[in-house]
């Protein structure tokens, strides 16, 4: 079986990603870190408030080129779904776990979420999330991977 050059490059990047940052705090090489912190907060505020338009606008340009807003709403609009009540979600970026750069930069980040919902006790969650840096802006990059709680250890 012969792999194309692109497939080989993608496989190498996934199997052996070149870390640009780590949980230990080496985040100096991550571009626009203050902007990433702000975007994380904005994204989670929009998700909690069911602001699907802002959620869509903060999704990667690649996804938005392929998925029109109306199609995105069918999957991500939670307005009439009682299992997803409106919540106040405050997010804090803890660290950038690692980044991989192919045509663009994708980073796994660790977040703390403070979630308040009417009639329920407040709760805190720690999650990992994927973010993408493209054209000078950070975008949420849905990875489809299971939600983890801690940065994977670097080797």
Image (tube, rainbow, N blue to C red):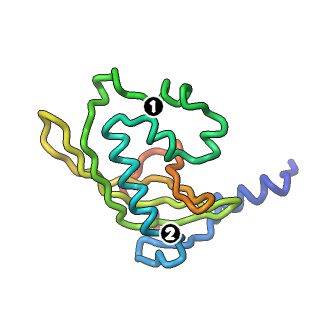
Q: Give the residue number, with chain letter if any, for mark 2.
A: 32
Q: Residue at x 54, y 76 (%)?
A: 29
SS of the residue under disc 2? loop
Q: Residue at x 28, y 23 (%)?
A: 82
**Few, some or many C-alpha atoms within 10 Å of disc 2 (few <14, some 14-19, many ≥20)?**
few
Question: If you read the primary sequence from the N terminus, does the residue marked by circle 2 or circle 1 appear first?
Answer: 2
**Farthest top residue in view:** 80
Q: Using residue 116 as the reference point, say whether residue 35 is left or right of it.
A: right
Q: Residue at x 28, y 46 (%)?
A: 89
Residue 22's x, y, as percent? Answer: 47, 72
Q: Which mark lies nearer to you, 2 or 1?
A: 2
Q: Give the residue number, with chain letter if any, for mark 1.
A: 76
Q: Residue at x 49, y 24 (%)?
A: 74
Residue 66's x, y, as percent? Answer: 66, 36
Q: Is residue 64 above or below residue 102?
A: above
Q: Using residue 79 as the reference point, say whether residue 88 is left or right of it.
A: left
Q: Is residue 139 above or below residue 154?
A: above
SS of the residue under disc 1? helix
Residue 11's x, y, as percent? Answer: 71, 56
Residue 6's x, y, as percent? Answer: 80, 55
């Amino acid at each position: 079986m012969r792999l194309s050059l692109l497939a080989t490059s993608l496989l190498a990047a996934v199997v052996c990603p070149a870390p640009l940052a780590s949980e230990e705090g080496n985040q100096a090489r991550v571009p626009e870190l203050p902007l990433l912190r702000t975007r994380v907060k904005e994204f989670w505020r929009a998700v909690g408030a069911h602001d699907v338009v802002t959620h869509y606008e903060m999704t990667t340009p690649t996804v938005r080129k392929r998925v029109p807003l109306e199609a995105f709403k069918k999957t991500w609009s939670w307005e009439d779904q009682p299992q997803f009540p409106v919540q106040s979600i405050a997010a804090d970026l803890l660290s950038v776990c690692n980044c991989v750069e192919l045509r663009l930069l994708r980073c796994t980040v660790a977040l703390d979420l403070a979630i308040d919902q009417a009639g329920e006790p407040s709760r805190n969650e720690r999650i990992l999330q994927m973010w993408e840096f493209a054209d000078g802006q950070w975008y949420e990059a849905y990875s489809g991977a299971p939600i983890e709680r801690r940065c994977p250890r670097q080797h």
